[in-house]
Structure formats: C-alpha cells, structure tokens
Image (tube, helix red, strand yellow):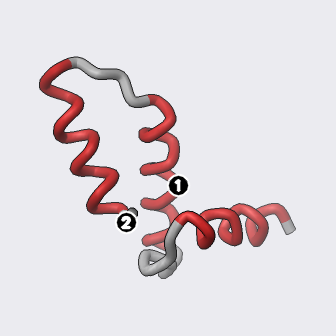
C-alpha cells in the first residue's frame, strides 16, 4: 500500500465520521518517507525508515 492508497482510505472514512487513528499515524510516516525520497518503499521500508532515524 502506498501513500496515495492511505490517503484514499482517509478520504473515504472522513464523510462517515470513521476515526482512523492508526491509519493516520502510518499515513504521516509515509508522508515523511516520501519527503525523504522513499516514496517507492512499502511497509518494510517503513521499518527501515524508523531504524535509520533511530541511529
């Protein structure tokens, strides 16, 4: 799932008032990954993204 897919989930949930706190957090992380040039990575890339930030 890519950033555009996660944003679509938010767009569909918003009108019906469905809270999506975990999806919101993951989406924000993917936005940061895109900003760092890692937009083509998947969930595994997210783990590596956090590992790189930790060090």
Seen at 50% across and 35% down, the residue is 22
Mark 1 packing: few (<14 Cα in 10 Å), some, or many (20+)?
some
Distance between the alpha carbons at the discs numbered 1 and 2: 11 Å
Image coordinates of residue 12 in percent, x first then y, are 17, 37
Quarter where residue 11 is shown? top left
Q: Which residue is mark 1?
A: 29
For the point 71% across and 62% down, the residue is 50
Residue 26 placement, left or right of 46: left
Residue at mark 2: 2
Quadrant position of residue 51: bottom right
Location of the N terminus (image quadrant): bottom left
Taking the image as shown, residue 50 lies to the left or right of residue 34, namely right
* Side of 18 where 50 appears, left or right: right
Identify whether 19 is placed above or below 54. above
Considering the numbered disc 2 on the image, is that residue within a helix, a strand or a loop? loop
Residue 15, how many percent across, how many down? 13, 25
Give the position of the C terminus as an image quadrant: bottom right
Q: Residues within 10 Å of mark 2 (few under 14, many from 20)?
A: some
């Amino acid at each position: 799932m890519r950033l555009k897919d996660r944003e679509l989930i938010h767009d569909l949930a918003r009108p019906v008032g469905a809270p999506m706190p975990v999806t919101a957090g993951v989406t924000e992380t993917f936005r940061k990954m895109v900003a760092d040039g890692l937009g083509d990575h998947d969930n595994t890339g997210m783990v590596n993204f956090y590992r790189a930030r930790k060090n």
